[in-house]
């Protein structure tokens, strides 16, 4: 049965759980012949980001459940390896990290887009990782500006020149989406300041170090509730819906970014951005990890995503509704991302370090 993209996130989560329950037991419950291996061990999750941002919080929400569901109840710790939009961490996982099941990667969503777009510095093959799933597949990116900057409408944004748009590193998803908004909104000569950690961006915006940024709608609802008040210090301008038609209850009035498209190519670029987001934030095991240990870790992720307590903890920590992808569905979503050359070439220019392409 094909589900409408207009279903609420809660409805999609219920549908997801129904699919999980229906999975054959041979998929959900692999053999645990090596279960004692994890007892007394430490599992390290390598994150391709700095600590403190929303991505870090999403990852930390999984920790107590992985410790519970990995047989032997190992300790789970974090290691941070920011840089190059997740490529640094992905390269390490692909070529250097231990392959015994004790290292899990969460390089950031940028690892997928960088590989498909053929970006410099990619030394890994996304088709050779073992995928463990993602805690979310629905997302809403919002373009927001500082109220004191005086960009109270889309028309004022378009009339301005040299707007400073903050982001994390080039290739990181906040950078990519900020560039996508700037391109489709038709901003004049925007300047991109890709020099912040996730936790630094909002304070930088309010202090006036930057004029605007792209951010997650749920992150705003969780961390910046004052932004939603009548005397908000920011203005909201447009939204990227993932999947298309999935309205965020607090930002339903915003124009969807695809409505600013001027061509079919523009629309395909937006669809590619959505596809990268639907792929979620990948949790992976390095290639060469023993099959039986891959199955054990995948089963632990499935059980985590099925646990109602995980959904509550995830929302409490991140502000997001959990909309998980199972390992096999995650791999399928990545495999089906559009690969058309014309779309890839334009998208590469959009997320690169050079000037935005003309329209």
Image (cartoon, helix red, strand yellow):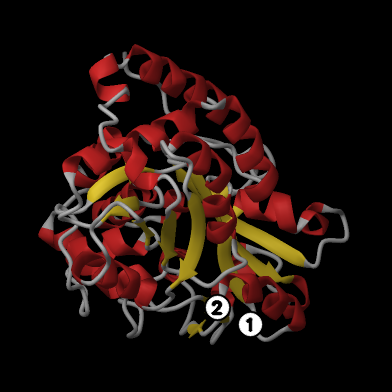
Q: Nearer the viewer, residue 332 or 202?
A: 332
Q: Earlier in the sequence, mark 2 or mark 1?
A: 2
Taking the image as shown, residue 1 lies to the left or right of residue 176, namely left
Left or right of 237, for residue 127: left
Residue at the right extreme? 231
Which residue: 28% across, 59% down?
A: 112
Which of 161 and 126 lies nearest the eye of the viewer?
126
Q: Nearest the camera: 290 or 271?
A: 290
> Residue 42 or 16: which is nearer the viewer?
42
Say if mark 2 contacts mark 1, CB within 8 Å: yes
Residue 128: give x, y in percent of width and height: 14, 54
Q: Is residue 11 left or right of residue 104?
A: right
**Label tally:** 2
Residue 358, percent across and down?
Answer: 31, 76
Q: Secondary structure at mark 2?
A: strand
Residue 359 visible, this angle: no
Q: Residue at x 36, y 51 (%)?
A: 282
Which residue: 26% across, 27% down?
30
Residue position marked by numbered label 1 in the rendering? 210
Could one spot residue 47 in this view of the protein? yes
Q: Which residue is mark 2?
A: 165
Q: Residues within 10 Å of mark 1 (few under 14, many from 20)?
A: many
Q: Along the horizontal axis of the image, is 299 left or right of 217? A: left
Cα gap from disc 2 to disc 1, whole angstroms: 6 Å
- Assign the C terminus to one quadrant of the image: bottom left
Q: Residues within 10 Å of mark 2 (few under 14, many from 20)?
A: many
């Amino acid at each position: 049965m094909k589900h409408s993209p207009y279903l609420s996130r809660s409805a999609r989560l219920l549908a997801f759980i129904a699919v999980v329950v229906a999975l054959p037991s041979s998929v959900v419950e692999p053999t645990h012949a090596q279960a004692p291996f994890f007892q007394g061990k430490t599992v390290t999750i390598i994150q391709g980001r700095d600590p403190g941002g929303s991505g870090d919080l999403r990852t930390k929400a999984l920790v107590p459940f992985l410790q519970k569901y990995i047989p032997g109840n190992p300790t789970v710790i974090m290691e941070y390896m920011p840089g190059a939009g997740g490529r640094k961490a992905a390269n390490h996982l692909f070529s250097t990290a231990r392959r015994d099941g004790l290292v899990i990667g969460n390089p950031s969503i940028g690892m997928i887009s960088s590989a498909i777009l053929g970006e410099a510095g990619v030394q890994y093959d996304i088709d050779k990782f073992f995928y463990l799933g993602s805690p979310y597949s629905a997302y809403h990116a919002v373009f927001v500006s500082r109220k004191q900057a005086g960009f109270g409408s889309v028309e004022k944004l378009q009339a301005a020149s040299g707007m400073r748009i903050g982001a994390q590193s080039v290739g990181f998803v906040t950078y990519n989406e900020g560039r996508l908004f700037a391109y489709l909104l038709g901003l004049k000569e925007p300047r991109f300041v890709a020099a912040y950690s996730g936790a630094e961006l909002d304070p930088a915006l309010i202090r006036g170090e930057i004029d605007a940024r792209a951010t997650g709608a749920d992150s705003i609802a969780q961390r910046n509730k004052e932004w939603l008040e009548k005397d908000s210090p920011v203005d909201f301008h447009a939204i990227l819906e993932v999947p298309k038609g999935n309205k965020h209850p607090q930002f339903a009035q915003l124009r969807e970014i695809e409505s600013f498209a001027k061509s079919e190519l523009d629309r395909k670029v937006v669809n590619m951005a959505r596809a990268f987001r639907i792929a979620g934030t990948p949790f992976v095991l390095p290639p060469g990890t023993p099959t039986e240990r891959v199955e054990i870790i995948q089963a632990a992720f499935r059980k985590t995503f099925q646990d109602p307590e995980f959904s509550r903890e995830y929302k409490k920590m991140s502000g997001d509704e959990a909309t998980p992808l199972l390992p096999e569905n995650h791999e399928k979503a990545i495999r089906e991302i559009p690969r058309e050359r014309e779309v890839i070439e334009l998208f590469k220019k959009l997320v690169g370090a050079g000037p935005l392409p003309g329209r």
